[in-house]
Amino acid sequence: MTMRQRLVPSGLNPDAQRFAITGGDGVARELYQLPGELNGKSGVFEWILDESGSNPVINHQRFIPGGGVTGYPNQVP
């Protein structure tokens, strides 16, 4: 089972758009973004998957009200 298959039950939606990103530390990671709604506000859900270590982890997960799918994390709408 791949990490992406394991993440679906824990919140990473398989319909999310995937982007390859490189952090400020030079490590390659995957950014996932999905438009949606939370508490009546439209925006974007985003997750960053870090598979650089022996145990892949989601090291970033948030909802950005008013945000959109951009391919860049932590946008300011």
Image: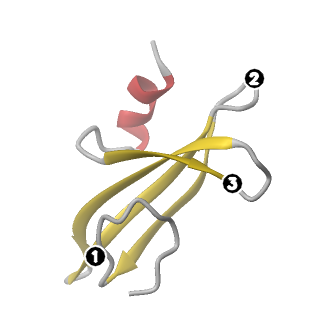
Question: Taking 41 as reference, is 3 above or below it?
Answer: above
Give the residue drawn at x 52%, y 73%.
Answer: 74
Which numbered disc covers residue 1?
A: none
Task: Give the residue pinned by disc 2.
Answer: 54
Q: Quadrant of residue 66?
A: bottom left
Q: How far from the left and from the top, in percent, is residue 52?
A: 71, 32
Q: Say which element carries label 2.
A: loop
Amino acid type of the residue tagged 3 in the rendering: Gly
Farthest top residue in view: 1
Residue occupying image coordinates x 60% and y 42%: 29
Q: Looking at the picture, how far across and down is residue 47, in whole percent?
A: 48, 54
In the figure, is residue 25 to the left or right of 75? right
- 2 or 3: tag closer to the N-terminus: 3
Q: Amino acid at mark 1?
A: Gly
Query: Sequence order check: which comes first, mark 3 or mark 1?
Result: 3
Q: Amino acid at mark 2?
A: Ser
Q: Nearer the viewer, mark 2 or mark 3?
A: 3
Query: Is 22 on the left or on the right of 72, as rendered?
Result: right
According to the picture, the residue beneath numbered tag 1 turns out to be: 43
